[in-house]
Image (spheres, rainbow, N blue to C red):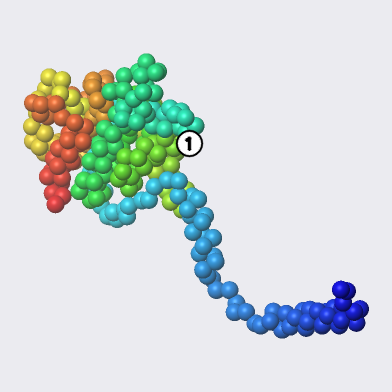
Amino acid sequence: MVRPYAVKGRKKKRKLEEASASHAARPAEEAEELPPPEVGSEEDEAVTGKEEHAAADGLPILPRMVDGKRQPGAIFVLERACLEVGKVGKTMQILNSDDHANYLRKQNRNPADYRPDIIHQALLAIFDSPLTKAGRLQAVYVRTEKGVLFEIKPHVRMPRTFKRFCGLMSQLLQKLSITAVGKREKLLNVVKNPVTRYLPVGARKIGLSFSAEKSVNLFDYVAKSSDDEPLVFVVGAMAHGKIDKEYTDDYIQICNYPLSAACCLNRICSALEQKWNIQ
């Protein structure tokens, strides 16, 4: 059954009137006065937050110590750190003996030599020490087994977890630098060899090894050093072997037993803290 033409016409007319009424009401709604945008509104903060998140490829920084007097400090050089990037699947990762043992065996390499956890623990021992928090750390240099040298600024907050640390090191070795969050300051930066070109003039370079012939009491050794002479401690960050002592001025043994890099650095920091009365 077909509806009469008049009914169709009335329905169509009613729809047109409703549409025109709603269209006329819109300008009235849009005519409401909006408050002027405030500086630093939520939208601006959201945009700024996104930009800062995008720039947060690097690390947060610690508050720096402000002191008018120039105080003596310490420099650490960590040698032979096992930080090697490999392509595992579709991603670039820092190779380690736990996660990539099968991959390393296929490449005819010894998984026991791939220990990036050693350098992670060593860096945490330095940056968690009262020596660093008191502002007495001048710089940290790390040289990998492949000979790549990079500098770490003393006010860096190192990643606490091993997974985040490996991700940071992988990014550093590929991009050659890591900047601070929201800033352009380079906190980690790959530099040219040798490391001696970055050390202060007249610095005393002290190498530590269990195989050294000269055995000393570290606390007495550090206490006798002059504050006018910057101290540079060279420590190995590898699983096996010893450091290159060619550029060191003194080559010492501080314990009758082999020590891990983190334990050795803890002893050095404690000796310096006692010398400079850092509580």
Image coordinates of residue 256 in percent, x first then y, are: 8, 26
Looking at the rendering, in which quadrant would you find the N terminus?
bottom right
Image coordinates of residue 222 in percent, x first then y, are: 13, 36
Residue 149 in view (yes/no): no
Q: Residue furthest top?
A: 108
Answer with left or right where residue 141 lies relative to residue 29.
left
* SS at mark 1 in the image: helix
Image coordinates of residue 278 in percent, x first then y, are: 15, 50
Q: Which residue is mark 1?
A: 175
Answer with left or right where residue 257 lies relative to residue 4.
left
Name the residue rendered at 17%, 34% in the picture: 264
Answer with left or right where residue 23 lies relative to residue 273.
right
* Vertical arrangement, residue 278 with respect to residue 28, above or below: above
Occupied quadrant, residue 230:
top left
The one of 72 and 171 positioned closer to us in this rendering: 171
Task: Answer few, some or many: residues within 10 Å of disc 1's Cα (few below 14, many 20 plus, some between 14 and 19).
Answer: few
